[in-house]
Image: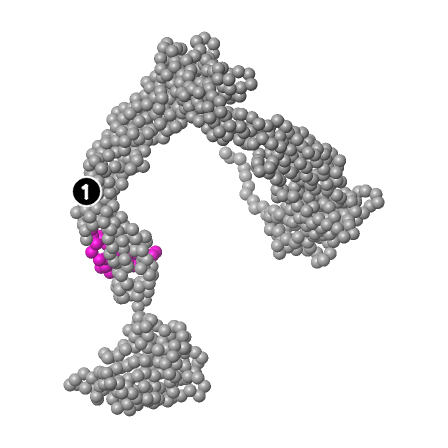
């Protein structure tokens, strides 16, 4: 609107605020006994606006609350320094305090604390180093507490006894009490059996002992806590009185074991296991699922001897009619067991299988039914469950009704020319008014063509598990097929079933609803090649103008048709930009043909063109069958090539008949040192040769030093300190005369010389015929004190050429001795 306003600048100055806080306010070292050492952690925080850089702790003496007053000196505890005594703005730091209770004197019992007027401090020692100033030094005060005294406890019940325990069940509970008989609070008292329960050679593991509670509430001085012990007696446990050792201890450090200064006591655990014949039926409940009226349902059960006595009497079933869960329908009474008796010989720890049959009368009302059956030991053989005969009850149940489903339409993927995935929609229809809650799938026979089979893992039905409401249709089911490219062509047919897996056994059985359906697919030609060499393939450093070594590439025909392969090359770009290696600089061997399943290898080499910018290059190359790429564009595979182009060697401009080797200027140290170059030389008649050191400065000016030698061994030197022929030698095969010649010189001035080279030349001047000269054992060495002649050949600090690692063509330089 038109309300008046006025703009102005406002400046605010924020003063620095230096502050620290001990977040807990009170640091309690807890209850400790004389001779005990302990550590604890607590948090501090920089709550100011500047970094604190000189943090210091100030400890104080602690005094007992009891009379007479005792002192726990500050020499017995400390707070560890912070890293660099520094705390950043807003930083929270986990500080550590440690304490040792004097055990030599020892420290008197008591509840120790600092005086209210003299709390402990942490402060930023800013004003007067070494002295706390409450006005100038930011600080926080806090209280320090510690309780000193004895820690002990006692188990008041010993032994702790259980009687009448039976194998295969949890015993009754035995009551026991624990008392804190020391002065200090016990915060983490625990109970556990530390030995197995044993009698003679029989054993129950300590893990079957059950304590309630396993961790007691905190116990103050003289306080008593109660607990209960019971045992989950394993099946088949032999009769006898078993004993073990109970440990009750105050687990101060929560490490699960009793330590030297932790209060503890032990007592005897004693349990009587009686002789008993005991059987158990599994599964329990035994549910037959849905059974149609007028049909007979069945379920397999297992009968276990969980007792500690062999069973030598008939194991029989007491059939109890199945009642409806709500009043109205008649019970189902036709119940039997195959075989009956199930057995008359069941040893300890063994089991026997049996089948229970339930026949549902025609016209029985659709409803859930159940009844408690009894599997018993028929000691007197009368077929009745009499008093005193051991038995085991279990629930037998079923639901009268029938589930039906159907699958439509036929799943036909048609003709496919790629691996996929290929998806086909279909539906599952619930043909009854009973909800299908546990729908799933099962392969009856896989997709097959003659002897060729598509692996079951290639076909997936989605969802894996499904639910279909009463009378409804699930119309969003998907069959998803992804084949292997090498799968032979042809028509494949498989058979599958959708079913309601009521009992979770993965098989359509009993009266579970099921629908069988076919899957068809016609696989056509599927060409495919796979490059098995890892991508990217790095060809390393390649000098400009120099071909790289051949690098091997492996590939394989993974399709179902034969291939005639070729490479489609692509340029390799400089990273990030600016230049590219052209396809003409990339050379692949010809891959040729591969039959189905065949593997092959080839090579690739790169020759960066002269003038190519040094740097890292990358480009993706394609392997394909050119005759198939139009119809099957996805059959190809690619490989990324990488390389690092480096500057090629450059050297002096020399006449023909010359060879040179560059020597790094770093070699010529120290300045002014004397060097000796030597070589073996052999010359044809009237031939001549030279051995020289060439220096080139930054402006391209050349300086030559060296010797000229003729076929007789005579030398002419230029720019040298000394020169000569060490020796001459005649070889018989081939017949040649060799002269070992040398010259010495002062090392080049590296502040002037940009490049230095050892140069060998055939200097013969003969217009009518060519004459040869031969060099061997070229050696460069730094002369030692008073050394005038070259050293014998050695592998020490001497440069020798020819050299197996380097060459005379100038591709490599000597940078190291």
Give the colour scheme of this rendering.
one colour
Q: Residue at x 37, y 77 (%)?
A: 799
Which one is in front, 54 or 396?
396
Q: Quadrant of residue 292?
A: top left
Count of numbered circles on the image: 1
569 part of magenta stretch = yes
Magenta stretch: includes residue 758: no
Q: Is residue 390 above or below residue 583?
A: above
Region in magenta: 565-591
Residue 326 picture location, percent across and down: 47, 11
Which residue bears the numbered disc 1?
631
Query: Can residue 718 be seen at all in this image of the molecule?
Result: no
**Pointer 1 local density, CA inside 10 Å: few below 14, some 14–19, many at least 20:** few
Residue drawn where x is 21% and y is 54% of the image: 591
Place of residue 602 in the rendered image (x, y in percent of width and height, measured from the top left):
24, 56
Name which quarter of the figure residue 271 lies in.
Answer: top right
> Percent x, y for residue 443?
31, 31
Residue beneath the point at 54% across and 39% down: 5
Q: Percent position (x, y) of residue 14?
A: 62, 48
């Amino acid at each position: 609107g038109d309300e008046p306003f006025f703009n102005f600048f406002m400046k605010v100055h924020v003063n620095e605020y230096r502050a620290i806080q001990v977040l807990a306010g009170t640091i309690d070292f807890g209850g400790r006994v004389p001779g005990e050492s302990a550590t604890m952690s607590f948090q501090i925080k920089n709550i100011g606006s500047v970094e604190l850089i000189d943090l210091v702790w100030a400890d104080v003496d602690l005094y007992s609350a009891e009379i007479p007053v005792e002192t726990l000196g500050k020499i017995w505890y400390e707070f560890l320094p912070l890293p660099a005594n520094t705390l950043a703005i807003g930083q929270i730091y986990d500080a550590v305090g440690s304490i040792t209770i004097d055990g030599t004197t020892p420290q008197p019992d008591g509840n120790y604390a600092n005086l209210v007027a003299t709390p402990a401090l942490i402060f930023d020692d800013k004003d007067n180093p070494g002295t706390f100033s409450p006005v100038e030094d930011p600080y926080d005060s806090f209280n320090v507490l510690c309780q000193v005294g004895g820690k002990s406890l006692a188990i008041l019940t010993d032994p702790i006894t259980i009687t009448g325990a039976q194998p295969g069940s949890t015993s009754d509970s035995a009551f026991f009490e624990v008392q804190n008989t020391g002065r200090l609070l016990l915060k983490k008292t625990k109970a556990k059996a530390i030995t197995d329960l044993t009698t003679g050679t029989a054993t129950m593991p300590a893990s079957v002992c059950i304590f309630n509670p396993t961790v007691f509430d905190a116990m103050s001085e003289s306080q008593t806590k109660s607990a209960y012990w019971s045992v989950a007696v394993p099946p088949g446990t032999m009769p006898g009185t078993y004993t073990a050792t109970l440990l009750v201890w105050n687990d101060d450090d929560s490490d699960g074991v009793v330590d030297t200064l932790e209060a503890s006591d032990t007592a005897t655990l004693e349990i009587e296991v009686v002789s008993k014949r005991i059987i158990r039926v599994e599964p329990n409940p035994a549910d037959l699922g849905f059974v149609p009226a007028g049909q007979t349902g069945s379920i397999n059960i297992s009968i276990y001897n969980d007792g500690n006595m062999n069973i030598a009497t008939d194991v029989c079933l007491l059939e109890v009619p199945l009642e409806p869960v709500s009043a109205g329908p008649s019970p189902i009474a036709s119940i039997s067991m195959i075989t009956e008796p199930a057995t008359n010989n069941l040893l300890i720890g063994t089991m026997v299988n049996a089948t229970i049959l339930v026949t549902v009368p025609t016209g029985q009302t659709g409803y859930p039914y159940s009844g408690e059956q009894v599997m018993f030991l028929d000691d007197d053989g009368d077929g009745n469950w009499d008093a005193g005969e051991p038995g085991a009850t279990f629930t037998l149940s079923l639901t009268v009704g029938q589930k039906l489903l159907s699958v439509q339409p036929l799943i036909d993927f048609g003709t496919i020319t790629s691996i996929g995935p290929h998806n086909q929609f279909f539906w599952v229809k619930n043909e009854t008014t009973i909800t299908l809650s546990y729908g799933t799938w099962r392969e009856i026979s896989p997709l097959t063509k003659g002897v060729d089979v598509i692996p079951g893992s290639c076909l997936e039905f989605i969802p894996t598990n499904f639910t279909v409401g009463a009378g409804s249709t699930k119309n969003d089911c998907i069959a998803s097929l992804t084949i292997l490219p090498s799968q032979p062509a042809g028509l494949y047919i498989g058979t599958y079933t959708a079913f309601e897996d009521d009992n979770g056994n993965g098989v359509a059985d009993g009266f579970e609803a099921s629908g069988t359906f076919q899957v068809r697919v016609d696989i056509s030609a599927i060409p495919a090649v796979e490059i098995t060499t890892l991508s990217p393939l790095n060809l390393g450093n390649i000098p400009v103008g120099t071909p790289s070594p051949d690098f091997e590439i492996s590939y394989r025909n993974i399709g179902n048709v034969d291939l005639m392969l070729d490479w489609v090359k692509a340029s390799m770009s400089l990273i990030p930009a600016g230049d590219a290696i052209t396809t003409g600089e990339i050379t692949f061997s010809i891959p040729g043909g591969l039959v189905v399943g065949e593997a092959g290898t080839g090579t690739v080499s790169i020759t960066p063109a002269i003038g190519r910018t040094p740097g890292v290059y990358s480009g993706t190359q394609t392997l394909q069958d050119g005759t198939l790429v139009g119809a099957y564009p996805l059959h190809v595979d690619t490989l990324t090539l990488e390389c690092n182009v480096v500057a090629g060697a450059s050297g002096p401009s020399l006449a023909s008949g010359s060879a040179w080797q560059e020597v790094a200027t770093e070699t010529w140290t120290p300045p002014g040192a004397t060097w000796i170059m030597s070589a073996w030389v052999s010359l044809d008649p009237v031939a001549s040769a030279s051995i020289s050191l060439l220096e080139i400065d930054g402006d391209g000016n050349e300086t030559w030093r060296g010797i000229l030698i003729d076929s007789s061994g005579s030398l002419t030197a230029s720019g040298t300190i000394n020169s000569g022929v060490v020796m001459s030698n005649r070889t018989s095969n081939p017949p040649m005369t060799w002269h070992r010649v040398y010259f010495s010189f002062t090392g080049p001035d590296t502040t002037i010389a940009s490049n230095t080279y050892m140069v060998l030349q055939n200097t013969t001047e003969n217009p009518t015929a060519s004459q040869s000269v031969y060099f061997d054992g070229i050696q460069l060495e730094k002369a030692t004190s008073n050394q005038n002649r070259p050293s014998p050949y050695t592998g020490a600090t001497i440069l020798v050429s020819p050299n197996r690692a380097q060459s005379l063509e100038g591709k490599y330089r000597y940078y190291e001795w």
